Amino acid sequence: MAKERILVVDDEEDILELVSYNLTREGYQVLCAKSGEEALDMARKELPDLMVLDLMLPGMDGLEVTKVLKSVNQTVNIPIVMLTAKGEEPDIVTGLELGADDYMTKPFSPRILVARVRAVLRRQSKESKEDDASVLRIHELVIHPGRHEVLFKGESIQLTYTEFDILKYLARRPGWVFTRTQIVDAVKGDDYPVTDRSVDVQIVGLRKKLGPAGKYIETVRGVGYRFKE
């Protein structure tokens, strides 16, 4: 049985070949695009299972591509792993807030990129199989794992898979304090190479999207985070 299809978008030929080669070697079907406009066209026609998207593209950049994809029902659920040469926090935060699921900065290890792609696809598959009976209701929030849906006072909140997993993990045990390492292990697996700062970036984006409900995610200085009882 063929593996998932992945759309790789980068205007640098050597990067495109490097990523394509390593993903193909893992059994994935790989599609390639060299511009934001071409990426949008292919995403709409092919509906890939995931995109590896460079932020620095000629014409329409990766952030614009992400914004368009996440604003249309047809493509809103396509997971996106961003690639950036900048490594600047504002670009990363903006991409995550727009709906990207993960990021890597250039230069990067192809093995780590493949691991992250695999992790995002695994999380997506896991969410789609969650039992509808596991709905969480706490404060004014309703968290529905099976539908990957969060409601606040009846209004839908759009979260990335990582943000959703973090919220669900914290909300399942309100009052419990979790370290950043525990959060990473729970939502990505203990072999996932991220830093404490990466968790902080996700929390910032999650709080912003939750609006007034963001206050329920509390920072425990020197330890980590907890969901308010």
Image: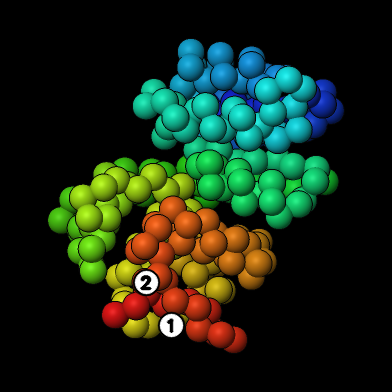
Query: On the image, numbered disc 2 is attached to which residue?
Result: 216
Q: In front: 59, or 117?
A: 59
First reached walking from the N terminus: tag 2 or tag 1: 1
Residue 203 in the image: state x and y as whole percent: 51, 63
Residue 122 appears anywhere in the view = no
What's the residue type where badge 1 is placed? Val
Residue 17 higher or lower than 116, as above or below: above
Residue 174 visible (yes or no): yes
Q: Secondary structure at mark 1?
A: strand
Q: Nearer the viewer, residue 202 or 4?
A: 202
Check residue 177 in the rendering and tell me which mark sits there, or answer none: 1
10 Å neighbourhood of mark 1: few (<14), some, or many (≥20)?
Answer: some
Which residue appears at 39% of the width and 45% of the height?
Answer: 158
Which image quarter is the N terminus in?
top left
Q: Position of residue 179 (x, y in %)?
A: 52, 79
Q: Single out the residue that lies furthest toward the front.
A: 212
Quadrant for the C terminus, please.
bottom left
Determine the residue positioned at 27% across, 55% down: 152
- Three-letter amino acid code at disc 2? Tyr
Task: Identify which residue is drawn at 77% across, 22% down.
Answer: 58
Give the spatial CA distance, label 2 vs label 1.
13 Å
Quarter of the figure with residue 66: top right
